[in-house]
Amino acid sequence: MARVVIVHGAFNELWGPNELKARWLPAVRDGLWHHDVQIEADDVAVCFYGDLFRHHPGSDEDRRLEQSRAGVADMLSEMGGDGIAALSQAAGDATFDRTVDLATAMLTEADLRDRLRARIEDEITDDTRVLVAHSLGTVLSYTALAARDDWPVHTFVTLGSPLAHPLMFNSLEPAPVDGQGVWPGAVQRWVNVRALNDKACETCVADKFGPRVEEFVIDNGHRAHSPEPYLNSRPTGAAIAAAFRAST
């Protein structure tokens, strides 16, 4: 079973778990290449939830979303460069309309967060040592880890994470205590990697969750928020390699 589980970020509703794994497995291998570590394809799994945000034209669910969409669009417009709107800008080719769709679903579907968390739970096994999450996936993964202190996950790797942004931080489950984020479950190591000019992660995660979080700043060039240059970076590869060594 997979030793590494990757949780994707927003705007992947038109992909699927096999497509994402085909794109990301080489990047994970390149990150580990820096540290002379090799992995098999079965060592990596992708937790996919994008289909939960895909439209189903004509359905009751889609009609409910459309009715709520205008109000959410107004809310995001008022935010300007803050909050979820900043995530849309950082995502490169993601449009404002797609951000509105995502936010509308998150705000109007009562059981959506439970279904999202269930997708992560389905991928975690006794063999899982590293949970790697990108962008919005870091928020979902954090919540799942905090709720399950019986998981064998040794290392939590967050990439381009908005966890420290006030909009996300103040609505976390579990809620912060006295301005300090709760440590995510039984995780022994948390590595946060953020890129220069990545608007989604301008705030340092360690500032909100304490000095146990190891912060690394990298340069992803013109692909500031893209998952692949995050995955193939030296710090990401080092964190995964160290977790493998610790488990043996």
Image (spheres, rainbow, N blue to C red):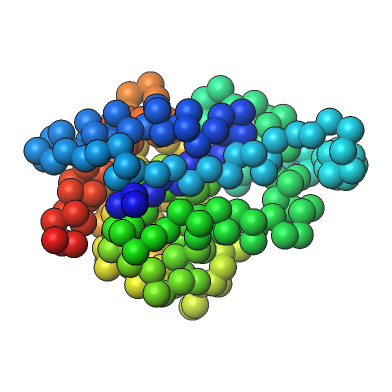
Up/down of 18 relative to 248, above or below: above
Q: Position of residue 133 (x, y in %)?
A: 42, 48
Q: Position of residue 191 (x, y in %)?
A: 29, 54
Q: Residue at x 73, y 37 (%)?
A: 101
Asked whether, in this view, residue 57 is left or right of residue 4, the answer is right
Q: Position of residue 65 (x, y in %)?
A: 83, 42
Q: Is residue 145 visible?
A: yes
Asked whether, in this view, residue 92 is left or right of residue 220, the answer is right
> Viewer-proximal residue, 112 or 195?
112
Q: Position of residue 20 (x, y in %)?
A: 46, 32
Up/down of 54 relative to 211, above or below: above
> Viewer-proximal residue, 23 or 93?
23
> Viewer-proximal residue, 235 or 64?
64
The outermost residue toward the left is 36
Asked whether, in this view, residue 167 is left or right of residue 147, the answer is right
Q: Residue at x 30, y 31 (%)?
A: 27
Count of picture labels: 0
Q: Residue at x 47, y 32 (%)?
A: 18
Q: Is residue 202 visible?
A: no
Q: Residue at x 40, y 28 (%)?
A: 22
Up/down of 133 relative to 223, above or below: below
Quadrant in the rendering for residue 150 = bottom left
Up/down of 55 relative to 140, above or below: above
Q: Quadrant of the C terminus?
A: bottom left
Asked whether, in this view, residue 52 is left or right of residue 20, the answer is right
